[in-house]
Every structure is written in C-alpha cells, then in structure tokens.
Image (tube, rainbow, N blue to C red):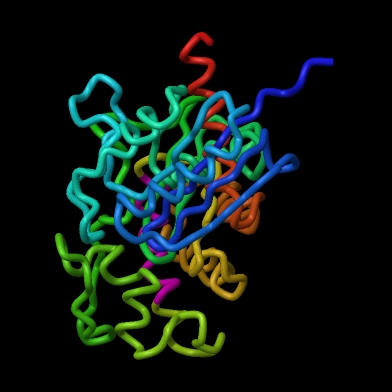
C-alpha cells in the first residue's frame, strides 16, 4: 500500500509561528508553536522542527506580510516593508530552500487560510469568497474561481481607509503607515491601547465591542461592494469571538441599507458572514494545502 504524501505547513504569524506535518485537518502528525522573534531565530526553530521529518515532500508557508508571492520577482519569498521590526527584507523562502531543497509554497497567512477553508472549511463549493482575520493584525485573503487572488502583489484588506468619527472615537490609530486605517483602529493591539486592557479581558457588554463591530462592518460593506463574494469568513482572535459576529452581521446589513439586493445579505446574513469552519486551524492547514500545490506545480 502506497503511503500518503506528507507535507510540512507553516503558519507564520506576527505573534507566533505554528509548524505542522501532515496531509490535512484530520491528519496532523506533529505540531509545534513558538513566539515570533527575529527572522534568524524564528526560522532556525522552524527548520530544526522539519529536520525531524525527512519524509516530507514539500513545505507551505502562509506568512504575515506584506510579502512578495511572485516567483518571477527578484524579491520573491521575502517580507516587504512591514510594521514588524526586523522583518523587512527577510528571505524566508530562500532559507527554507537552502535547508531542504524541496518545493516551497508561499503566500500570505490569510490567503493560506482561505485555501484551507476552500478545501476543508466554510469555503467549500464556492467560486468567490473572502477570508478576513482580525487579531494582532488585519488581513484578507480572496479566492476567485479556483485561485487565490494576487494581482499586483496581494490584497491588503487591513489598510482600508475608515470613516473615523473623532467625537465618538478620539483614539488616533496605531498604523505606522496610515494611522487610522482599518488596521490602525480595529486590531486587538489598537483595542488594548484605546481601552487600556487586552481585548480578551473586556466583558461582552463593554462599549469596545459595539465600536469594533462598527469598524468591521464598514470594512465588510466595502468588500461586498468591490468583490461581491458569496461568503465572508471572519477569523482571528478578535473576529472569532461569538459575541462580535452577530453585531457585525447586523451592522453590515444596516450599512448596506438595501443596496445589494441579494437574499444572502437581506435574508441569510447568519450564513453569509461566518466564522471559519476550521476554527483557528485554517492557517496551518492552509499551509499544508500550499505545500501540496507547490509539489504539483513542481512536477515531482
């Protein structure tokens, strides 16, 4: 009996890296997670983990960005200018290929999560959908007609300009590039700075959640107008809270104000904006799918 092909997957987040060996969500044979520190230290721990599994055939890396996912670009596989100190210019794909000489799939963490949801989660059977993560950072992966959307570089859903009522919310924002864009106002980090305590410790009836849902819903309306997705999957440490999902659904419908005449948003919003089918596993499982994709593309 032929053994199934084994893959390595990396969810490279701004706060932590998660590395796994397996074939999919029902077959994770080994896993490790550790804090994201410097590129050298973080990648050394990653490489040391995968060296224990010489049978893997390809590696997928779904990483925070911005990054260069274009194999024809001279900076392919690198982190582009980023708010994460010390990571600009880090050649992550280069480090992996030098260590393993295997096909490497490389994309954003949210594109990877979208791919995982397409194969095994709440994106199954859809032609166009979006995966949005709201946590330490904000990002969006877009799946269109069988492929992840890249275009010029890749979608940067977190840096959407936001209507900012300074009377309601005098907080200036934290984005080092745009200050009060969506990411600057609505990440978990922004919430902690605004309210003086971690978002996870804020009670469900705290006004923070109504304001947070307000910003997320404004972003949702823009994504709906521009992409017309069949579903939006809302993940991340903040986005996956059950108490915020209903607020986001209600506010999104209200902000659309009947303009989009689709039963999906008029009657079935509870099935339109949803949490990930894979829970918090979308990213690392999606990285395994990136590895599988890379192996197929390599022709090996």
Quadrant for residue 38, please give it. bottom left
Q: Tell me the magenta residue range.
A: 212-225
Q: Majority secondary structure of the magenta segment? A: helix
Q: Nearer the viewer, residue 154 or 95?
A: 95
Residue at the image position 30 percent from the left and 63 percent from the top? 183
Residue at the image position 21 percent from the left and 24 percent from the top? 73
Quadrant for residue 91, please give it. top left
Q: Position of residue 202 (x, y in %)?
A: 49, 87
In the depicted structure, whether residue 279 falls above or below residue 48:
below
Q: Is residue 18 left or right of residue 75?
A: right
Q: Position of residue 46 (x, y in %)?
A: 46, 46
Residue at the image position 45 percent from the left and 60 percent from the top? 16
Asked if residue 221 is among those painted magenta in the image, a careful observer would answer yes
Q: Quadrant of the N terminus?
A: top right
Q: Nearer the viewer, residue 59 or 148?
A: 59
In the depicted structure, whether residue 271 falls above or below residue 135:
above
Q: Is residue 205 left or right of residue 148?
A: right
Q: Nearer the viewer, residue 112 or 41?
A: 41
Q: Residue furthest left?
A: 177
Q: Nearer the viewer, residue 75 or 112?
A: 75
Q: Residue furthest right?
A: 1
Q: Position of residue 72 (x, y in %)?
A: 25, 19
Res. 262 in view: no
Q: Position of residue 79 (x, y in %)?
A: 25, 43
Q: How many marks?
A: 0
In the depicted structure, whether residue 200 falls above or below residue 248:
below
Residue at the image position 56 percent from the left and 36 percent from the top? 8
Quadrant for residue 279, please give it. bottom right
Res. 222 in view: yes
Asked if residue 177 is among those painted magenta in the image, a careful observer would answer no
């Amino acid at each position: 009996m032929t053994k199934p092909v084994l893959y390595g997957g990396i969810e490279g987040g701004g706060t932590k890296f998660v590395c796994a060996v397996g074939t999919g969500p029902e077959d994770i044979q080994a896993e490790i997670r550790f804090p994201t520190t410097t590129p050298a230290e973080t990648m050394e721990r990653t490489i040391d983990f995968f060296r224990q599994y010489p049978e893997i055939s390809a590696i997928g890396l779904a990483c925070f960005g911005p990054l260069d996912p274009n194999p024809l670009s001279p900076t392919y596989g690198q982190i582009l200018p980023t708010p994460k100190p010390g990571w600009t210019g880090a050649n992550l794909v280069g480090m992996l290929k030098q260590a393993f000489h295997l096909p490497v799939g490389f994309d954003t963490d949210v594109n990877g999560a979208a791919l995982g949801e397409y194969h095994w989660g709440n994106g199954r059977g859809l032609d166009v959908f979006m995966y949005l993560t709201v946590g330490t950072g904000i990002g969006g992966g877009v799946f269109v007609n069988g492929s992840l959307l890249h275009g010029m570089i890749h979608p940067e859903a977190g840096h959407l300009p936001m209507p900012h009522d300074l009377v309601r919310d005098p907080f200036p924002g934290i984005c080092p590039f745009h200050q009060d864009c969506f990411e600057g106002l609505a990440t978990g980090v922004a919430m902690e700075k605004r309210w003086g305590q971690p978002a996870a410790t804020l009670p469900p009836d705290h006004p923070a959640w109504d304001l947070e849902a307000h910003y997320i819903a404004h972003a949702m309306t823009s994504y709906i107008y521009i992409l017309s997705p069949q579903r939006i999957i809302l993940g991340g440490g903040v986005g996956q809270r059950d108490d915020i999902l209903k607020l986001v659904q209600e506010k999104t419908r209200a902000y659309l104000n009947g303009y989009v005449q689709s039963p999906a948003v008029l009657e079935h919003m509870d099935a339109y904006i949803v949490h990930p089918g894979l829970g918090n596993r979308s990213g690392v499982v999606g990285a395994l799918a990136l590895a599988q994709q890379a192996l197929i593309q390599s022709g090996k």
